[in-house]
Every structure is written in structure tokens, then in C-alpha cells.
Amino acid sequence: MIYQIIMTRFFLLLLLINIFISQSKHPFPPQELVTIPTAGTMPRGAYSLEALLAKEGSIVTKLAVGFTDSFTFGVSFGIQNFIGEEGPALNRPTPEVQIKYRVFDETEIYPALTYGLDTQGRGKFIQNIDLENGEILNLERYEQKAWGMYLVLSKNWDIFGNCGLHFGLSKNYWEINDEDKDINIFFGIDKEINRSFSLLFEYDAALNDNDYSFDEISFGQGRGYLNAGLRWAIANNLLVEINLNNINKNTDALFTNRQIKIIYSEIF
């Protein structure tokens, strides 16, 4: 009995050591942190397949392709209740689009600058909402708005492993039926623990989602969204993330939103 306990603990220790000294390292720069975009783009001839497993059994799939080292094009498609016993429902019948073009590469002094478009919001896609006066407001928006058009700066340093700092501005021109048209800001940090694990921290100010003409359509409390995640490079072309969204309880949710993201990348 004692021998079995010792051997079990020994194998568990070997497993932990193998995990934390694993030499797997993803070869492509991160396209985003938990949710915010970075200035990273896919290399020419590379592609990635992503699956985001989110609340209420929803899934958002994404395909991104690097046409050049500076230009990445992607499409995404979301389904609510994909897992569960309720009937599945499409977010929208047409795919969402992601476009990234890196204007300037990163140097030892200056950050990389990328201009992009992302029409994929977070959460459910809400078409209409009933107002107290009996009217129906056509919202046509996600629970958390898409980034829309954005500019993002990214700079990396080698501080006991890579440490990246990201800052951006975004403007959504179409999810504006709530009459909140402000420019949004976001920033984040990713820090390597070792070659396999990285920590992700980000803040989305949600300035374009904190002012409403109707009380019934208040999706947030004006505090923005604080998110964090752990990224694990299981293999050279496979990433798994465990993400925590809305840590600061910007909405009336009782608990932090937990998500799992799986990313597979390859060269044609």
C-alpha cells in the first residue's frame, strides 16, 4: 500500500515536471490575448483554426490565413446552445470577418502598428428588445460589441521570457442603435512563464457601451471588462487557453465568465 502511494506521487511529480519544463513553443505571434487584438499577424502561408467554448454551451469557430507576413484575413461563425439540450441558434446567418494589416514592424525601439477590422462581437447576438412603452427597438448587436475598426500597438521585451505590451483604439460604426458611438480603448499584457505557459491580462474600457438612451438596454455598468487567461502550448502547433472574462463584474452576472479556447496552426 505504501509502495503504491509512493509510486503514484512519483509519477504525478514526473508529470508536473514534464509540464513545466516542456519545450513546446508556438511559432506564430499571438493574434489576440483573451479578447483584445494584438499587432501580430500570421506568417505568409500559415493558417489557424480556433474554437472558443463559451457560456451556455456556445461555440465560436474562426479560420485565419496569412496571405503575406503583414496581411491576415479571417472569418468566424458563432452558434449558441451548441452544447446542451436546448435548440442551437446561429448568432448571424453570415460569417463575421477579421482583417489585419501590419503597417510597421516592431523594432528594438518602436512598437509594431497594425490596422484591422473585426466584426465578431462577444456573447449572444441580440436583434430586438422590448421597451417599457411597448415599442420594439432594433438593436442588431452582440452582448459585447465587436471591435470594429481598430489600431493597435504591440511591443515585446525579453524579461525572463517574452513580455508583450499591447494598446489600441477601436471604433464600431454599425452596432450603434443604442446611440453610444464613442471611440473605445483597450490594453493588455502577455507574459511567458516558460516556453509552454503564458499569462494574459487585458482591460477593455468599453467606452462605446456605457451610455444609453433607454434603461432597458444597459449591458454594462460602465466599469469596462477586466479579463485574464492562461495559455498552454501543448505542441508546436496547438494552443489551449483557460480564460476568465468580466472579472470585475461589469454586468449583473453572478460569476466570472469562464471560457476555453483551442487554437491549431499550421503552414500550407
Image (cartoon, rainbow, N blue to C red):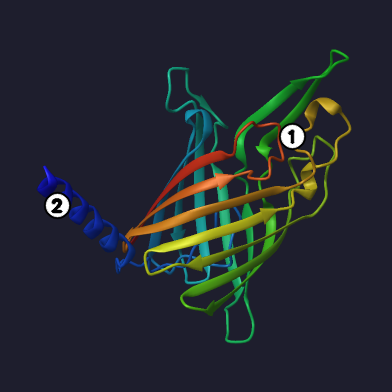
Q: Nearer the viewer, mark 1 or mark 2?
A: 2
Instruction: Indicate which disc residue 7 carries.
Output: 2
In the rendered image, which quarter contains the C terminus? Answer: bottom left
Above/below status of 123 relative to 98: above
Q: Position of residue 178 (x, y in %)?
A: 81, 35
Count of marks overlaid on the render: 2
| Residue most extreme to the top | 134
Q: Nearer the viewer, residue 167 or 88?
A: 167
Above/below status of 184 relative to 101: above
In the rendered image, which quarter contains the N terminus? Answer: top left
Q: Rounded to the nearest whole Å, what is the CA distance between mark 1 and mark 2?
A: 52 Å
| Residue most extreme to the bottom | 108
Q: Position of residue 111 (x, y in %)?
A: 63, 77
- Asked whether residue 67 is in view, the answer is yes
Q: Classify 10 Å Cα crowding around label 2: few (below 14), some (14-19), many (20 and above).
A: few
The answer to which quarter of the image holds residue 216 is top right
Q: Residue at x 62, y 42 (%)?
A: 121
Q: Position of residue 266 (x, y in %)?
A: 33, 60
Q: Residue at x 68, y 40 (%)?
A: 249
Amino acid at pointer 2:
Met
Instruction: Indicate which disc residue 80 carries.
Output: none
Q: Is residue 125 left or right of residue 3?
A: right
Circle 1 SS class: loop
Q: Is residue 46 left or right of residue 250?
A: left
Amino acid at pointer 1:
Phe
Residue marked by disc 1: 219
Q: Residue at x 76, y 26 (%)?
A: 138
